[in-house]
Amino acid sequence: MTLSNGYPTTTVIGLEVHVQLKTETKLFCGCSTTFGAAPNTQVCPVCLGLPGALPVMNDAAIELSIRAGLAIDCSIPPMTKWDRKQYFYPDLPKGYQISQFDLPICADGFLEIPDPANPEKTRHIGIIRAHLEEDAGKSMHDEAAGRGDTRIDLNRCGTPLLEIVSQPDLRSSAEAKAYLQELKLRMTHLGISDCEMQEGSLRVDANVNLHIEVDGKKIATPIVEVKNMNSFRAVERAIEHEVDRQYDLWEDTGKTIEDETKTTRGWDDGAGKTFLQREKEESADYRYFPDPDLLPIRLPADRIEAARASLGELPAALRVRLENQYGIKPYDADVIVNQGPALIAYFETAGTKSGDGKRTSSWIQQDVMRTIKDREIDIDQFPVSADELGELLRRVSKGEIDNTRARDVFAHMIEHQVTVEAAITALGIESVDDNELESLCKELLDANPQVVEDFKGGKQQAVGSLIGQAKKRNPNANPQVVRETLIKLLQAM
Amino acid sequence: MLDSALEILRLQNDGEATAVEIASAALDAIEASQPTINAFTHVDREVALAAAAVVDAKRAAGGKLGPLAGVPVAVKDVLCTHDMPTTCSSKMLKDFRPPYDAGVVERLRNSDAVIIGKTNMDEFAMGASTENSAFGVTRNPWNTDRIPGGSSGGAAACVAAGTVPLSLGTDTGGSIRQPAAMCGVTGLKPTYGRVSRYGLIAFASSLDQVGPIAWSVPDVALLLQTIAGFDRRDSTSLNLNISRYSDGLESADLTGMRIGLLRESMDRDGVDESVRQATLTAADVFRSLGAEIVEIDLPHNDYWVPTYYVIAPSEASSNLSRYDGAHYGHRASDISGDDELGPLVTTYCRSRAEGFGDEVKRRIMVGTYALSEGYADQYYSQALKVRRLIKGDYDTAFGQVDLLLGPVTPTPAFPLGEKVDDPIQMYLCDLFTVGANLAGVPAISLPAGLDASGLPVAVQLQAPVLEESRLLMAGAAFQTATDHHQRRPSATRH
């Protein structure tokens, strides 16, 4: 990339993604992790760090972390342990966070992402590590009317987080977004996390700097860590802003990575700017040491292999298979895979039954997903089973029912929760006999000599006006078949 | 004087005394001794008598009673109790009332013991003299000008003063055995993980262990039986069956047992002649009981104290972070005026400066330094390596002998104030005891005589992990053959 007036520049981005694991209870106690409860109602002596209380590990978090690590091609070491990361802050009741320092649960993986610059290619993004840690609480600063109060909600204390740290392999905001989308897809697909950014179950910090080439020499700008962005759009915009800002700053001051240590900046979405949070004059000393209240965790090879076997097909492979097996476009395969395992299964069942992957994909993307959204339900609660939808679409493909009538049938099935067969009967839909249809068409042609004349004169579309009439006389007539029959008769005339 | 738990159980069974009468006697004795000994930080007569009345009512109704029914037990003020303050003898936790009981306290309640009160200690269990208490020093019942030892000074002194038969202490580097030795009572530090640490306010998590203090081995065994066992709320708690510690103590036989005498360690400077003599005499007693005595050495003995004084403060600096004035503990009232640090940091600094005593601050500083970037490798990591060597010494020794015999303390109880200004001298009180904590092995302090001025002297037995029964057997045999544990301080004899 070359900026407007300047030197060839490479953007260097590394992401730290905090994924909240979808466990019922917290990392070291039995408290609920449900989002949105009244402040300080989901707490106990352990997550409050009350004197004398001790942490007890939640094995479900370990299991989810192993699955997450395997999903991003990490190795899972045979032993992992807990460390204390120490700092004072009002939302950290123990004065330390239980985390992992030198032996994280996942190490050395990668994520293959579509290359935004070239749809034919992919990019290989390295993952340094993923470690498990407890979340801190939440400070709410009340500065209204000159007050300086801070209220602390400790509900979130002890919620399990997996921090996934990428290599600085990302080269643009578009790549960062693609990486986050692929990561989120894998985590939601495997049920590891909800990845709801608004609820804080996926949080992103971005480390950004530039490598500027001046007279064949590479100059690096100081690294900036942009903290806690709450949408993919914000991540993209913040990175783009940083690229411009850092380049301009370098032009103004000439400061490089040697002159300044990493700084932390926040993102102001309204202003579209990052702002300085604190200057790390020297890096914080967290005084990590092994937590003596928790034993190291052994992860035998058979446990890891069992987890690997349970993963099933990952999204990337799934997409390719759906394209090939059902003859759908990459875009459509992507939409379906993005909806998660339950909808994928629904699609596969319906598509197999209908024998028409394309039609099934389009019905699911339009009719099914719209209904789900309107009714605020999950696919599991959808009133039409995949089998019944498949059967309906099979009949459409065979020409037994036209699309319009099929939508009536579908609506009836949703409303009354009945089978295709029952819906068709209830709506009085019968398949129209070919001879019956032919005589109907003959009658219409006889009654409309103008249409015959127009057709003979080369105006094929003239038959259109008769299709509506045919439908009026017999609602079960398939417009497509009516059109074909009319043309056949006209051509024979 | 009701100084035996077994005797108290017998009295109630035979209808000679009620739990309320026994609790009253204990409460009266505490009240009488408190002005001079100051062993307790909290006693609530009504609560204790109510607990005793429940036991009497249960007995009257023919209900099933626990193994410590109606026995008064004192609890060190580092163990959480939901119905009494838990202060760690610190200004920091002066008003702390935990919403829950420690695992061991729950077990005491389930065994129908009567929790009589909370005992004084060195602040946050840091010290060897109980002089570092925000609630005043505890005095040694044998000589009130002397320290009772520490940090479980109150826990040992309350037994020695004849106020309660049983008491719970905690031992991080010798804090049960050293005060037990100086107060002439029997104290046991169990294997690390044998007793739950849930609700024990942490000093150094990898070393802390709760244990019993009483006059004699059978009473110690009875209390250990009650508190030992798995607790799923403590990840370091051992999920193993426990022995029946009281079984077979009367007929303990040491024939063929090999006891290693830690001779070399005794011959160092600063070890009082009375301690040396008592240890050698004890070796003779064990020999006369059929044990074979062999001299043995734990090669890294010289590194025990330095290793301990890196690891324990490191963990303490972390464990005590939570007392920041924002969440727990004392909060400084005046936090204005320091614009440079801002109100938050000023709150932390002033609260901790006001809430903690000197020794606690000293250890937080040492621990913070030892863990800090650039020094952790030199101190903390190095100490962990040496700790493994020390454990290795024990493994090697226990390949050759069944028990280790040596002193508990270098000297009998020293005068109050003698070492308060010399932390290094104070730390050397732990010379013989910290090894058991670093290695996680069980150890017991047994009264072994009086010195020329009438102060108690003791010996220590150490056993391989989980061999508490072996310690108790040997201790019981020793007490059958001697009467040291039957001596009582004349000053407080009732």
Image: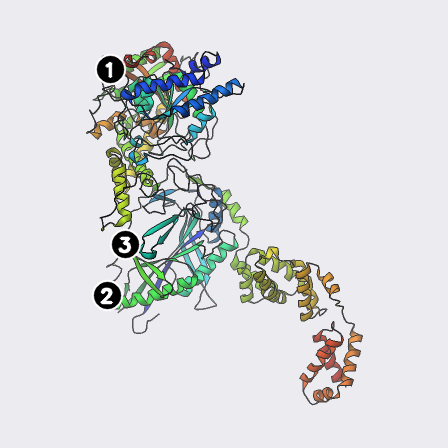
Say yes or no: labels 1 and 3 on the same chain: no
- Whether the residues at callouts 2 and 1 have beta carbons within 8 Å, the answer is no
Return the residue nearer the eye: B82 or A99: B82
Res A450 seen here: yes
Q: CA distance from mark 1 to mark 3?
A: 59 Å
Between marks 1 and 3 in the image, the one whose residue lies nearer the viewer: 3
Q: Count all numbered tags in the image, as a single digit.
A: 3
Q: Secondary structure at mark 2?
A: loop
Task: Determine crowd level at label 3: few under 14, some 14-19, many 20+ residues with C-alpha closer than 10 A.
Answer: few
Return the residue nearer the eye: A288 or B339: B339
Question: Is residue A319 depicted above or below B474 in this figure?
Answer: below
Say yes or no: labels 2 and 3 on the same chain: yes
Task: Please state which amino acid type lies under the numbered disc 1.
Answer: Ser
Res A347 → quadrant:
bottom right
Q: Where is residue B112? Give x, y as percent.
A: 46, 23
Judging by the rendered image, the residue that carries numbered circle 2 is A254
Judging by the rendered image, the residue that carries numbered circle 1 is B274
Residue at 26%, 15% in the rendered image: B455
Q: Chain of mark 3?
A: A
Q: Where is residue A259? Give x, y as percent.
A: 23, 59
Task: Please state which amino acid type lies under the numbered disc 2.
Answer: Gly
Q: CA distance from mark 2 to mark 1?
A: 76 Å
Q: Chain of mark 2?
A: A
Question: Is residue A328 depicted above or below A139 in this figure?
Answer: below
Task: Determine crowd level at label 2: few under 14, some 14-19, many 20+ residues with C-alpha closer than 10 A.
Answer: few
- Whether the residues at callouts 1 and 3 have beta carbons within 8 Å, the answer is no
